[in-house]
Image (cartoon, rainbow, N blue to C red):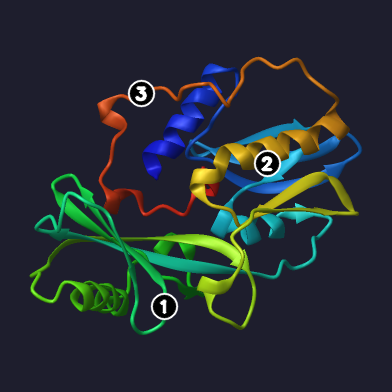
Amino acid sequence: DALLTRAVLASACELGAQGWCPAELLAAERVPQGYDLRILRDASEVALRCRFLINAAGPWSAVVRERVQPALPLQAVDCVLGSHLVIEPRLSERAFYLESPSDGRAVFALPWKGRTLLGTTEHVYRGDPDRVAPPLSDTDYLLGVLAHYFPTFEAQVIDRFAGLRVLPAGDGSAFRRPRECVLQRDPQHPRLLNLSGGKLTGYRAIAERVAATLRVPLGARKAIADTAELRLPRLDASLQSSPSASSSTDVQRA
């Protein structure tokens, strides 16, 4: 997840985009030409003006919305936590689709770097997105699903990691909620686009929808690349990280 996000960012920068990471939006004030922004970068505050602002902050999208003036209405979304386990030994060279005997959820057991990657879970998370971690109950749940189908397999948990995605708010099971990315605009903020939902692997299709939305207020531009055919750059080994270091929240974190 983290490597894919970094590769997409590197590709965008090769085509002329400018990426700051880490950086924090402190405030965004609507002006006739778009938004005046205050951004914290390298312990220094930077002032910028943009013609169009896209909130793709995922689990932090509510934080971004709170820093926009005039104030935006509350957004009815939930943060949903999903956990993965890295276990030894490798279960198989094949990938397995399993259904939980307790609630029917899909769980995958995948060969991964000589070990087995087991996941995922889904339940609403009310805590701080910066402190997301896999609860012990998720470990018990995933190992229980695995033991149901492979009762003689002796799994040893080597690592755990968790991530968040944003889904429409609701009272039912998170597993049953729609996964489509929703593009939202407010009449008071015609030059602000809020993204919620979606999956990391659908980033390019989501980006195409966003680009189509921007063509109206910003005008058509000459294409400089065809992302359907463009290969992502191979990242330097120094940028690679372990699953536990990534703790991803889907693509919106970048």
Q: Residue at x 79, y 38 (%)?
A: 213
**Callouts 3 and 1 close, C-beta under 8 Å:** no
Please report whichever mark, 3 or 2, sits nearer to the chain's N-terminal start: 2
Toward the viewer: 251 or 153? 153
The amino acid marked with disc number 1 is Gly
Q: Amino acid at mark 3?
A: Arg
User: Which of the two discs, 3 and 1, labels the residue nearer the N terminus?
Assistant: 1
Residue 59 horizontal/vertical position (percent): 55, 59
Name the amino acid type tagged 2.
Arg
SS at circle 3: loop
Q: Position of residue 206 (x, y in %)?
A: 64, 42
Q: Residue at x 70, y 57 (%)?
A: 65
Whichever of callouts 1 and 2 sits on the residue coming sooner in the sequence is: 2
**Residue occupied by mark 1:** 104
Foreground disc of the pair 3, 1: 1
Q: Are marks 1 and 2 in contact (CB under 8 Å)?
A: no
How many C-alpha atoms fall within 10 Å of the one at disc 2: few (<14), some, or many (≥20)?
A: some
Q: Residue at x 25, y 46 (%)?
A: 242
Q: 116 or 21: nearer the eye?
A: 116
At horizontal 67% and vertical 35% (from top left) the residue drawn is: 208
- In the image, is residue 150 above or below residue 231? below
Task: Identify the disc placed on residue 38.
Answer: 2
Circle 3 residue:
234
Residue 52 in the image: state x and y as whole percent: 78, 37
The quadrant of the picture occupied by the N terminus is top left
The image shows residue 108, relative to residue 238, as above or below, that is below
From the top left corner, tell me how far across and down residue 215 is, in percent. 82, 30
Q: Which corner quadrant of the image does residue 58 belong to?
A: bottom right
